[in-house]
Image: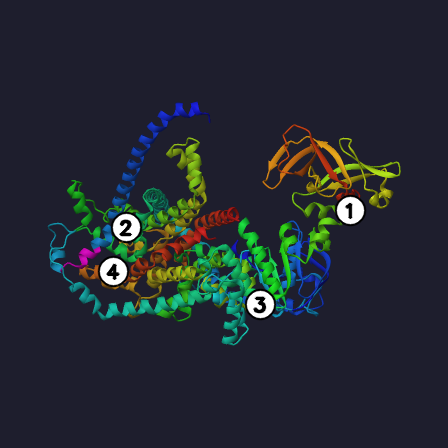
Amino acid sequence: MAQVSLRKIVKAYEGGVQAVKGIDLEIADHEFVVLVGPSGCGKSTTLRMIAGLEEITGGEIAIGGTVVNDIPPRDRDIAMVFQNYALYPHMSVYENMAFGLTLRKFPKAEIDKRVKEAARILDITPLLERKPKALSGGQRQRVAMGRAIVRDPKVFLFDEPLSNLDAKLRVQMRTEIKKVHQTVRTTTVYVTHDQVEAMTLADRVVVMNHGIIEQVGPPQELYHHPATKFVAGFIGSPAMNFLPARLEESSGGLNVVIAGGASLPVPPARVDRYRSYAGKQVLFGIRPEHLTDDKTTDKHNLEPLSLTPEVIEPMGMETLAHFKLEGTEISARLDPSTPAEVGKPLALLAHMGQMHLIDPATDKVI
Amino acid sequence: MSATAANRDAPGIYHKAGSLRAERRWALWTAYASLGVAAIIFLAPPFYMLITSLKTSGEIANMTGNPWLVRDPTLENYEAIVFNPMFQRFMLNSIIITASVVALTMVISILAAFALARMRFWGSQVLATGVFLTYLVPDTLLFIPLYQIVGGLGLLNSIWGLILVYPTLTVPFCTWIMIGYFASIPKELDEAALIDGASWPQMLIKIFIPVALPGIIAATIFAFTVSWAAFVYPTAFVTTPDQMPLTIGVVSQLVRADTFAWGQIMAGALMAALPPVVIYAFLMDYYIAGLTAGATKG
Amino acid sequence: MAADGSLAMNGGTGMRSGRANSMQRFARRRSTIAFVMTLPLLAIIVGLVAYPAAYAIYLSTLNRRMTEFAGTLNFELLFESDTFWAVAFQSCFFAITAVLLKALLGFWLAHMLHHIPDKGQRKWRGMLLVPWVIPPALSTLGWWWMFDPSYSSINWLLAIVSVPEVPWLGHHWWARIAIIMVNVWIGAPFFMIMYLAALKSVPEQLYEAAAIDGASSWQRLRYVTLPMMANIISITVLFSLIVTFANYDIVRVLTNGGPRDLTHVFASYAFQVGILSGNIPRGAAVSLFMFPILAICAFFVLRSVTRRNKEQM
């Protein structure tokens, strides 16, 4: 078990395209860190550099205090779980899990003990003699994890391990992975494009975009205090609404004047923070769950806003309503009992305590 | 579609369905008829060879009556051919040549295909294309210069000369289809092996060869049938009967002018054709996979 | 091309110049190993294909005894000989006719095979591929016996439907037809198998969509099957053109070039001149005539294959 440090990591391909543009990251021992971002953001490349499957163009990676730039994958003491599982099709489940240990010349008894133990943890003991072909997607995923666990490596690396599973199984395996981590406590780096996976699994989430790190933090912090517009829009589903707005001073306070002319007062506690932007164009961000008709929660800083829905999507536990405000699509989460109708104005409440203002010049959250 | 429109169309659909069934039946009948005729024509020559091989010389010489029937079946032709030392020699030569060529071919092409499919290096692209082009070069284009080269090495009239040149017939295609099979193995598999601690040779032996085993069997069958059936090179390079493989041996030595022992010739030809046919019968799927792999795999 | 499936590990090597770290050494050693692994293949391609090809050109410029340089004399003499032109004609006539017939017959049979229930396909396919499996020299021997002038079993069958006796190998046109027949018999199953594999790779939904769009079975063949198979058809035809054009076995066993050298193809004529008559340079010159036509075919095959690979990516 060990910590992992990335210092100024750069990955450039022939032709000068930079996939990773100098990132710094410290991962503590036992920590579960998730790299999340859209495809092409450099998250997989970063993981593969930690694994030693991609050469590092610049910077240093250290695992357990040792710089591993020059060390081939097999000597890095890592284990990896791949998106398509990468199980050896000609070997049984047992042989798949034992392969790494066999190559490292572990004694037979030790291999047997470890494989059986991992199989017990993952609940795949009855499958040990089967070939991967005879397994379901979820079972293959468990075997792939088992192969990593038996090695008892310093670091687990997961490369989008759940993307090939159907939605229901994905949720189940997500829990499973979390459970396994709580049992074995191995430092884990996990790559996914799914922000829900990132939020549910991670001790800390690393949001990446265009080869740089946008923000690092615990899931709740990313949700409540996104640092940039990208993070604000990426974390949370449905995504946060962004409306062009102007910040106007009025009798000592500040008002957000959004497209359509509605004027929403800024909570007094935030006035000082935003004062310097008074009179300027900003981006007003508010999550759909904070634009609602539900009056039972937080009673403070609720501001009425009337909007006419274009599309209504009942989801059961909630209803999503979509609006268009001067060309900008926005959505709101409604109580399922609300009698919402397309074309009929809805009285909503904006939770101004949960709002965000973004400086359009820097895309940073103010 | 509205309900009324559906109703209006309904009689038409029923009518169509009726004719569709008749059409299907007719198409199926045509298919079976075509296949039946083709099968008769395709199997007639080997069948006639078999019939002839079961006839006595007297019956063959008797030119009245139906040649496609045997009145008086006998195994004397087979007995004569099996105990013919010359034929035994041909068989032995064919076995030695084919076994050596298959072994050589598989070692060369598996190594090369692994390198070309997985370990990119300078010129590997060009080489892969070169392999395919070599595969397209027919044996009849080069047998004259090769005759000189083999002669220069003192290997004319020797099975070793044939073992030297036969790989030109087998290696390019086998390499080509093995590249295809290896390339179809997901890259994550070797990455997983790399992380599990495998070296390149271990990766080849423990992962690639077992995973691509169907491809290897298909390539082996191909190499076997090609070297067993090779005709141009032995015809050109071997003139003494004791170094001849079966193909040219049967065609040139059993067929002696004036004294055509047709029964024995046909028995010999069938015996010579037996090994590929047996392999085909038992491993048809691999045989066909190898045949079609060249075009579909890559 | 398939050789692209390598680990993308050696990207950006120049960036860390000066420090030959072990990752780089690992990569470098890898390409050395890879090169060593391809050496036997390279030796075969260079030593037994490329070098002989060049050597053939050199040989063709020598005089009969191979003592002196004779320039283009061998080619000039060939151009003046009637036999050579007959050989050239026969080669082209044979290759084109045989390939065309094989392709059509193969396509028809593949189509028929595709239409019958899956259960029976294996059995039929197994029977119909037999001609391809028997070594051609040996099956041709069987055909030779069937064409035997004194007691042709084919003529016996034809006599049943009162067709007069056919001088199969005695008359040059009949002999040419006989050679084509045998070649089609051997080669059609190969086309059938290739087309069947291609037919099976056309998704069933395409036919269903076409049927719903109102396409008749002929239109489905014309607008769905053929375009989907165009590439495999061209690859098979071109490949077969190469092999058929360079054919030797059938002519050697069936007619040995006769009657009156009128059934020789390039390969058998080159053999006759080069090996049997011992005029190596002339023989080399004859076989070189195959080269341009084969090269053109090879070029188009390669193009089709590359295009096919691109489509599949």
Report the residue marked by disc 2: C260
Report the residue marked by disc 1: A365
Q: Nearer the viewer, mark 2 or mark 3?
A: 3
Res C184 visible: no
Determine contact: label 1, label 4, CB under 8 Å: no
Q: Amino acid at mark 4?
A: Ala
Picture quadrant of residue A340 = top right
Examine the rendered structure and indicate whether residue B4 appears above or below residue C128.
above
Mark 1 vs mark 4, CA separation in Å: 86 Å
Mark 3 vs mark 1, CA separation in Å: 53 Å
Instruction: Work out which residue is located at the far right of the displayed protein and give it.
Output: A252
Q: Dot 3 falls on which chain?
A: C
Q: Dot 1 falls on which chain?
A: A
Mark number displayed over residue B269: 4
Instruction: State the SS at label 4.
Output: helix
Segment tinted magenta in the rendering: B49-56
Examine the rendered structure and indicate whether residue B187 appears above or below residue A241.
below
Instruction: State the SS at label 1.
Output: strand
Report the residue marked by disc 3: C32
Mark 4 vs mark 3, CA separation in Å: 48 Å
Q: Dot 2 falls on which chain?
A: C
Badges 4 and 3, same chain: no
Mark 2 vs mark 3, CA separation in Å: 57 Å
